[in-house]
Amino acid sequence: MFALPKLDARRPAPARFASLVAAEGAWYTRAEPIMGTAIRVELWSTQRALAEQAMAAVMTEMHRIDRCMSPHHAYSELSRINRDAAFAPVPLSAEMAGLLARAIEFSALSGGAFDISYAAVGQLYDYRRGLRPEGAALDHARAAVGWQHLVLNPQARTLRFARHGMRIDLGGFAKGHAVDRCIALLRERGIEHAMVSAGGDSHVLGDRRGRPWNVAIRDPRREGGVVALLPLQDTAVSTSGDYERYFERDGERCHHILDPRSGRSPTGLRSVTILADDGLTAEALSKTLFVLGLERGMALVEGQAGVDAVVVDDQGRLHCSSGLQAGNAAASGKTAPPGAR
């Protein structure tokens, strides 16, 4: 395990170190299971009541987003879309319309490697029972996949499916949006130092009062192991791995990250971590890079301003985007992480 240096914009500013003698306060934490994952908030405050109110606001917001965007809630906005959009345009909330617009942008950017309509195939996987679609069932579901058939009307704020059998799923998107929203709520309440995490998605606000937040990248093949430590501030992080939900079939690891074009789990990588200014971008690009693979995925990341990537390939080797490598690191007086390529 090694510490991975970050770009200047994400290092703790020197002036932060002078704040160590600030007014008395304490760190507060709260955790709950929401959105099918562990939601955790940690923040600094000089007032316990303010801290409790801020953490409660985070959990309330997470529950709200879950009620709106979960495919498991029959009356969620997402369920209503999946139920009705093949028959008529479905009215959307402003929040949902904005998310769908961003999703379509990422689909176009990635050439379909990111596609929320993958759900037509994804719903046929059963990871607990080790079942995946085959033959005619897979072919039929794949025919309903295609972001180009999502007819979004931004003016009327409606969505229509141009093909029957289409479904959408925001599982590769909603948690990044949720951590962004919660960080915004904390800022509104005057919180300057905080972290909100939702499974593999995190967003850090400020620093840890003079020190960076250290976000660990877990070892994809060793429980409890860490392959890298990211010292960060004011950054969103998303990690996608083939170890979260999977089963083995005929020597193949069938995991929850699916290539929308094939309906199968991509091979070649074990985990992808994206660092970006917002969680929505980080989560979408972590899924995208995983599907595209190392070479094409890194090329895409290199073209995105303010985005970096750390990738573990199928041999356990670590790869970093150029913003984290020796050339840029040397320019700011940092050294390249050992073992990174």
Image (tube, grey):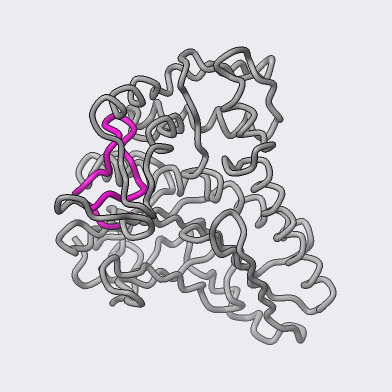
The residue shown at (44%, 48%) is 306
The residue shown at (54%, 49%) is 176
Q: Position of residue 321 (x, y in %)?
A: 29, 53
Tell which of 121 and 280 is nearer to you: 121
Relative to 141, is 237 above or below?
below
User: Which quadrant would residue 53 be assigned to in this image?
Assistant: bottom right
Relative to 291, is 42 above or below?
below
Q: Which residues are magenta?
A: 253-272
Tell which of 37 and 52 is nearer to you: 37
Judge whether residue 211 is colored magenta: no
Q: How many marks?
A: 0
Tell me the chief SS of the magenta region: loop
Q: Position of residue 115 (x, y in %)?
A: 41, 32
Q: Position of residue 295 (x, y in %)?
A: 20, 43
Q: Position of residue 130 (x, y in %)?
A: 31, 51
The residue shown at (31%, 28%) is 137
Specify the quadrant that holds the N terminus. Answer: bottom left
Horizontal side of residue 105 vs 2, given as left or right: right
In this orientation, does residue 334 appear?
no
Specify the quadrant that holds the C terminus. Answer: bottom left
The residue shown at (46%, 73%) is 214
> Looking at this rendering, what residue extends furthest in the right direction?
49
Horizontal side of residue 274 vs 242, given as left or right: right
Relative to 98, is 258 above or below?
below
Tell which of 210 and 213 is nearer to you: 213
In this orientation, does residue 223 appear?
yes
